Image: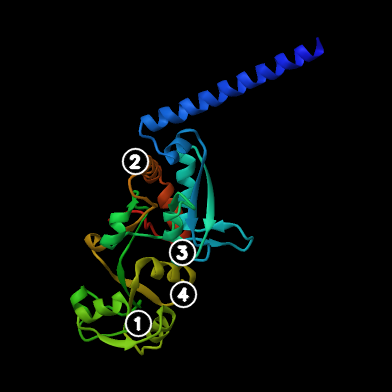
Amino acid sequence: MKRRALLTLAVSTLLLSACGQSTTNEASTDAANNGESELLQRINSGGTINIGTEGTYPPFSYHDVSGKLTGYDVEVSRAVADKLGVSVEFKETQWDAMLAGLDSKRFDMVANQVSLTTPERKAKYDKAMAYSWSGAVVLAPTDDNRYSSWESLKGLRTAQSLSSNYGELAERYQAEIVPVDGMAQAVQLVKQDRADFTMNDNLAVLDYLKNFPDSGLEIKLTAPASELRGSGLILRKGDDAVVAKIDEAMSALQKDGTLTKLSQQFFGADISKQD
């Protein structure tokens, strides 16, 4: 009698397990038939998304004094995840290996100031709605009033790395190049009056001015909106439904002021808008 009861229990357990497995398989099949990706399923079910970032790239992605991962890109990603109703897990990796990690599906997307400027990257990846915009700016002493237009750079001395895009841009406006190794040295030459100005990325300059408000320098010229580059979350090509959901979340964060608030927190200016 006892043996028969145990046999009946075992058979019932197997049937329940089979029914459960059948239901799961049917749900997966239905999702596949509906054209949903595995990532979209996780988002729709309130699961976890994985985001690749450097963790050593302040003020975009870094660890604060307490060891917490933070930064503009990180906090924007957390806000997007909150809007989507999902959890987020960050996977830190070196920049050189970041897109390879995306290719190998180590993570679902990348948040690390990527703007997809080359045709090769545009063909391989999708970019969601931009959460930061940047372009070239001219940094010079506050009391120097010679910068009425980009054409006014002609004949002035600019501290630039010869291999940078900004050095090429300065040459286009016929400025005299004073060679430097990087932005830190360029700023020092301007402050020492060994160069009239330096040109660099808007976000890098805003970060410098936020950290050194008494530098005696200010932004004199900013690239027009048409020349700004937008950076957003980067995904593998083809998951249009996920991109649409991220765009919707990012648009909501733009409208409710979250992106502006985070911009002011990390840069002292709103970098989330193109104009």
Name the kind of residue labelled 2 in the image.
Ala
Q: Which mark is residue 26?
A: none
Residue 272 vs residue 95: left or right? left
**Residue bearing mark 2:** 244
The residue under label 1 is which amino acid type? Ser
What whole-number distance in Å separates the C-alpha atoms at marks 3 and 1? 25 Å
Instruction: Find disc 4 in the rendering and name its residue.
Output: 214
Q: Earlier in the sequence, mark 2 or mark 3?
A: 3
Q: Residue furthest right?
A: 2
Answer with mark 4 or mark 1, whichever residue precedes in sequence. Answer: 1
Residue ID at (47%, 46%): 79
Quadrant of the rendered image containing residue 141: bottom left
Q: Which residue is mark 3?
A: 97
The secondary structure type at the circle numbered 2 is helix
| 107 left or right of 159 in image | right
**Residue visible at 35% across and 49% down in the picture:** 128
Q: Inspect the image, locate mark 4, and give the three-letter code of the amino acid beneath it.
A: Asp
Q: Position of residue 243 (x, y in %)?
A: 35, 44
- Asked if residue 61 is positioned above or below residue 22 in the image, the reply reads below
Q: CA distance from mark 4 to mark 2?
A: 43 Å
Badge 3 density bin: few <14, some 14–19, many ≥20, Cα 10 Å = few
> Considering only vertical position in the picture, is 9 above or below 156?
above
Q: Which of the image's four quarters has the N terminus? A: top right
Say which element carries label 1: loop
Q: Earlier in the sequence, mark 3 or mark 1?
A: 3
Report x, y in % for residue 56: 52, 66
Work out whether residue 83 or residue 42 is closer to the camera in this orientation and state it. Answer: 42
Label 4 CA crowd tier, 10 Å (few <14, some 14–19, many 20+)? few
Give me the disc on residue 161.
Answer: 1
